[in-house]
Image (tube, rainbow, N blue to C red):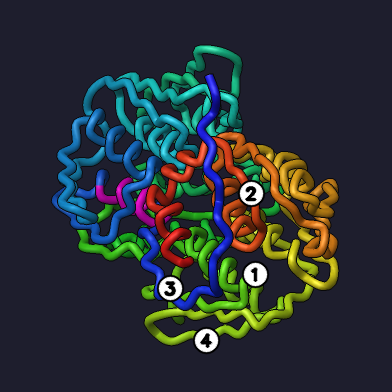
Amino acid sequence: MTAEVRIVDPLAAPPGAVVAVPGSKSIANRALVCAALADGTSTLDNVPDGDDTVAMLACLRELGLDAGIDGDRVTITGRGAPEAPAALHAALAGTTSRFVTALAALGSHPVTVDGLPPLRRRPFAPLMDALVQLGVSVRPAGGWGSLQVEVCGPPASGTVRIPGDVSSQYVTALMLVGPYLPGGLRLELTSPLVSRPYVEMTAAVMGWFGHRDVAVGEDLVCVAPGAYAPSEVFVEPDASSASYPLAVAAVTGGWAEIPGLGEGALQGDARFADLLADMGCRVERTAKAVRVTGTGALHGVDVDMADISDLVPTVAAVALFADSPTRIRGVGFIRAKESDRLGDLARELRTLGGQVTETSDGLVVAPSRAGLHGGRLGTHHDHRLAMAFGVVGSAVPGVEVEDPGVVSKSWPGFWAMLEALG
């Protein structure tokens, strides 16, 4: 069967647009777990309609929670630890699968967590190891460290050791259930913490639901025992998704503005605008929005992206158009994301004539604008690769993206947005 392919048309003129970006799936999924554990009804506004959030809501319903949807508003009535056996399916959602596994481990009935084949191939061992340390029964159907897995609690302890340099999602999963562990959570990190802004985001979301006694240190995370309270929250626009229209402005010399992502944004990936400023763009921030204007001249940067690793494909796409090399460092761990976000990304960009070299912990992108041409690109089940390829296609004729529907994981309307920019 022939794979679906989307031909990306270059923009007819540099854009000048205010772009509405879906809510952050990272914030939404954290808030949904807190709401599920809170005793009472919570309301979340600006919840995105991407696959990860849909999968989270489906899992919570399977756990017996009442979750209603009205447009981008979700009303959920929580009731603490799961009270019955359940079978949960997380589709392709890494955050969902890890968060609901920790949530399910609070209950005293067996809960099975599974996903589609690409999710089954993603690493799960650090979370399984952690749950065993907490006294939870963990029974994988296949080899240790991958889905499908059955967990059954309740936990007998709140102390655990876990590596911090694999994925912050494991740390977050444990933090979210930390108030409900015996004595709270004492999480000792055996290696440096990557993507620290995501962990700090977790602490902030927990605070929205009334639990603020959370300490995030260099090698220790502590969560006091307690409980969440119902809350009403607004999910700010997804900063990772916002990077794509901002990047299009950078490579085409136009401008794009993202409302709702101004000064004080919670997400670490809101730093993308600062990276574009370093690369030669003009950036304007207000309390309510951020605007990036391309100046027609882009320069390479040397940047450690360990804390903002979801932006690697976008930065690599922009770097193709720079007049000096860009070095991306500190992100070796993203080889185990939805795709190998170093190897797969580098190979596909080279298909277009990009001069991209893989390193042990990142990429080097040499100036490539003059040699860029069209070509067909595989997305490797990865929404972030697909959208980064859309950025390149906005300025380079003949870019074709296989499996373009993969963007539904975080931004189902991405291609329509890209067309509207033109």
Distance CA(mark 1)–CA(mark 3) = 17 Å
Q: Residue at x 37, y 59 (%)?
A: 22
Distance CA(mark 2)–CA(mark 1) = 15 Å
Q: Earlier in the sequence, mark 2 or mark 4?
A: 4
Residue range highlighted in magenta: 26-35
Most foreground residue, 123 or 81:
123
Q: Residue at x 20, y 51 (%)?
A: 74
Residue position marked by numbered label 4 in the rendering: 284
Query: Quick one: which residue is furthest to the top in this view?
Result: 141
Q: Decide: marks 2, 3 in contact (CB < 8 A)? A: no
* Picture quadrant of residue 219: bottom right
Numbered disc in front, either 2 or 1:
2
In the picture, measured across the screen, residue 153 lies left or right of residue 129, that is: left
Task: Please name the amino acid that badge 3 sits on.
Answer: Ile
Residue position marked by numbered label 2 in the rendering: 399
Numbered disc in front, either 2 or 4:
2
Q: Earlier in the sequence, mark 2 or mark 1?
A: 1
Q: Is residue 119 above or below residue 236?
A: above
Q: Earlier in the sequence, mark 1 or mark 3?
A: 1
* Picture quadrant of residue 260: bottom left
Can residue 264 be seen here? The reply is no
Distance CA(mark 4)–CA(mark 3) = 11 Å
Numbered disc in front, either 4 or 1:
1
Most foreground residue, 248 or 373:
373
| Residue 403 image label | none
Residue 138 magenta: no
Estimate the x, y position of residue 271 in percent, counting from the top left. 58, 71
Disc 2, SS: strand
Most foreground residue, 172 or 348:
348
Main secondary structure type of the part rendered in magenta: helix
Can residue 395 be seen here? The reply is yes
Disc 3, SS: strand
